[in-house]
C-alpha cells in the first residue's frame, strides 16, 4: 500500500519583508499565512516548526492508539504536545530537539506498561522515523 499526501507553500518577496501561504491537501490549512515574522518574531501565523510538531504529535498519537489496541487497551483520552526546538548553530538554523509530552487516560493500564507502549509508538511512528536525525524525547503522564 502506498499513500501520497501533499502540503504546499507560496512565497513572495524577500526573506524579512516577504510573505508566504501554506496549504494542505485536505484544506485544513488553506493559504494560511507564514513568514519571517511568524517564525522568528512571534507574530500570529504559522511556521514550519509548529507544522512539524502538529504532524509528529498526530502521527505518534495514532500509532500509540493502534499499539494500545494491540495490547488489549483502549484509551479514554490521549493528548500529545510536540515541542520542536529550532536553534541557530554555526552551520545555520537547525531543528535540534523534539519533545513529545503525552498525557493519557487508559483504563487497565499501569504507568510502566503505558510508558513502554508509548516508547514503542515513538520509535514506530512514521514521522519519528522521518525525523530520525533529530533527538526525540518522550515524557509520559498517566492519570
Image (tube, rainbow, N blue to C red):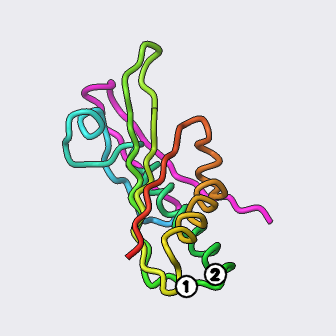
Q: Position of residue 92 (x, y in %)?
A: 43, 18
Residue for point 80% across, 66% down: 1
Image: magenta residue range? 1-25
Relative height, residue 51 to residue 43 (above, below) = below
Left or right: 62 as drawn, with respect to 140 = right
Left or right: 31 as drawn, with respect to 4 = left
Numbered mark located on residue 131 in the image: none
Q: Are marks 2 and 1 in contact (CB under 8 Å)?
A: yes
CA separation in Å, label 2 and label 1? 6 Å
Is residue 78 visible in this depiction of the protein? Answer: yes
Relative height, residue 131 to residue 138 (above, below) = above
Instruction: Give whichever of discs 2 and 1 has the lower sequence position.
Output: 2
Q: Which residue is the site of mark 1?
A: 74
Given the current orientation, which residue lies at the most extreme right position? 1
Residue for point 47% across, 59% down: 57
Q: Residues within 10 Å of mark 2 (few under 14, many from 20)?
A: few
Using the image as rendered, state which of residue 110 and residue 93 is in the foreground.
110
Q: Position of residue 46 (x, y in %)?
A: 32, 48
Q: Which residue is the site of mark 2?
A: 69
Amino acid at each position: 500500500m502506498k499513500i501520497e499526501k501533499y502540503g504546499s507553500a507560496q512565497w513572495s518577496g524577500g526573506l524579512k519583508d516577504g510573505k508566504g501561504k501554506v496549504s494542505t491537501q485536505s484544506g485544513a490549512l488553506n493559504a494560511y499565512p507564514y513568514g519571517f515574522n511568524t517564525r522568528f518574531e512571534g507574530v500570529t501565523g504559522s511556521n514550519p516548526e509548529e507544522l512539524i510538531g502538529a504532524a509528529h504529535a498526530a502521527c505518534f498519537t495514532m500509532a500509540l492508539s493502534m499499539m494500545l489496541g494491540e495490547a488489549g487497551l483502549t484509551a479514554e483520552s490521549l493528548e500529545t504536545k510536540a515541542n520542536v526546538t529550532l536553534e541557530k548553530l554555526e552551520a545555520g538554523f537547525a531543528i535540534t530537539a523534539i519533545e513529545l509530552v503525552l498525557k493519557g487516560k487508559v483504563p487497565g493500564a499501569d504507568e510502566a506498561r503505558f510508558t513502554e507502549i508509548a516508547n514503542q509508538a515513538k520509535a514506530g511512528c512514521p514521522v519519528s522515523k522521518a525525523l530520525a536525525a533529530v533527538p526525540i524525547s518522550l515524557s509520559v503522564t498517566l492519570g
